[in-house]
Image (cartoon, coloured by chain):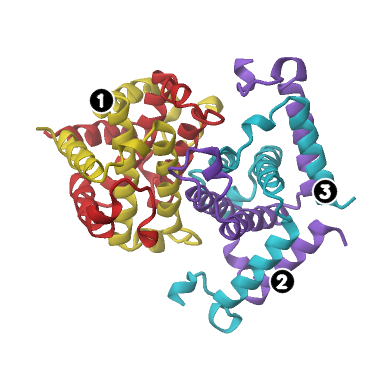
Chain colours: A cyan, B purple, C red, D yellow
Amino acid sequence: MSDIDEIIKALTEFRDARDWKQFHDSKNLASAIAIEAGELNELFLWKNKLQEIESVNKERLSEELADVFSFAFLLADKNNLNVKEIILKKIDLNDKKYPVEKAKGTSKKYNEL
Amino acid sequence: MSDIDEIIKALTEFRDARDWKQFHDSKNLASAIAIEAGELNELFLWKNKLQEIESVNKERLSEELADVFSFAFLLADKNNLNVKEIILKKIDLNDKKYPVEKAKGTSKKYNEL
Amino acid sequence: MSDIDEIIKALTEFRDARDWKQFHDSKNLASAIAIEAGELNELFLWKNKLQEIESVNKERLSEELADVFSFAFLLADKNNLNVKEIILKKIDLNDKKYPVEKAKGTSKKYNEL
Amino acid sequence: MSDIDEIIKALTEFRDARDWKQFHDSKNLASAIAIEAGELNELFLWKNKLQEIESVNKERLSEELADVFSFAFLLADKNNLNVKEIILKKIDLNDKKYPVEKAKGTSKKYNEL
């Protein structure tokens, strides 16, 4: 079993043991991702120095990031999306939106390149 | 190479070809996750009927979810976090916060169980 | 003094008594708005029935919404933006993006009308 | 009429001309706030230098911030919350959570003071 299949299996077993599938429509899962992303961002709030930013508590970072990932994997699973496939496909799209010769070394958005 | 290693390799190669590592501190990556989560949620905005929610455009859903995943994998990689490990560990923590006998069939938060 | 001036005065006095202006650059204030918006959304997570949604705890709703407003007013003040003016101006813009005859009774985005 | 009453009147007239009240339950309004907060944050993404952050396009900042405010005022109105009151009340609460003598000059969260 691949890493990703193992993750999804663990998440869906946890969910099903609690009979939570009934709450996991795609809209609520998307909302849960945004809520957890908010908690993740709170770890960095008011921190501006790189050293402070990169010395954030790793335990809390792991937990908040794990929450984002968990709901993202559950939303992918709910919609029968293959996570590796959709990411590789998006990289291909971004390769066209951000051609190396234009995008190298700049953080501009594609419509400003 | 595992699925996840393959994903991270593709993402970091895309990033490095554009010399974008300089922009990818943990705070900006966390912010990027939240921004993409916002775009993901926009797909579901004002939709309340389950049928509408679950018939959202799969192409756009794939792209927005892929964006969330991409920045989440980059943030994990930046902090040397093993994605499978942090998720399985968080499931263990949640197993204690949400014991099956209390949490079964309810969407209450752990501090309200 | 107008209501809004009074609000901004109370917020900046609270801030200045704590010498917090140094942390309140526009990027962190924008991030704070998103974080508080996440907490606001958590009140509604997993709730799908209108009756459940609209009977959410009013005390907690008031507090989370007040947090969103507070950072939004501080960001406006930081950038010398007149809150009433920018909202009325945005309504004018939206009036063109969403003409009544096309937008009436539909929740479609302007680019799908 | 107070500034805030004028804003809410303009927003609800715009809404009612389009028959959009039917879509504006509290959960969707909260989601709209988070989505607009994401767009607001995108203006600052990848910008780390204070000078870059504070020279963000004022027109776009005004529009994104106006969107956040608009849905926040609509959510307050939907729940009969007086915006000035809930903010002043939250400042009182924060006054206790962040006493001046402990909180002065530090960006720590109240539970870390």
Query: Are the residues tagged 2 and 1 within 8 Å (C-beta)?
Result: no
Residue count near mark 3 (Cα–Cα under 10 Å), binned few <14, some 14–19, many ≥20: some
Tag of residue D82: 1
Residue at mark 3 to residue at mark 1: CA–CA distance = 49 Å
Q: Chain of mark 2?
A: B
Q: Chain of mark 3?
A: A
Residue at mark 2 to residue at mark 1: CA–CA distance = 52 Å
Residue C69 x/y as whole percent: 33, 36
What SS does tag 2 mark? helix
Is B14 displayed left or right of D88 in the figure? right
Q: Which residue lies under the disc numbered 2? A: B13
Residue D71 x/y as whole percent: 33, 41
Is A33 in front, or is A26?
A: A26
Question: Dividing the picture into quarters, in which one does residue A28 lie?
Answer: top right
Residue C19 in view:
no
Question: Dividing the picture into quarters, in which one does residue A66 lie?
Answer: top right
Q: Residue at x 23, y 52 (%)?
A: C100
Q: Residue at x 61, y 54 (%)?
A: B65
Is C75 in front, or is C93?
A: C93
Q: Which residue lies under the disc numbered 3? A: A5
Tag of residue D70: none
Depicted D96 relative to depicted B82: above or below: above
Is C98 displayed left or right of B113 in the figure? left
Q: Residue at x 68, y 21 (%)?
A: B105
Quarter holding the N terminus of chain D is top left
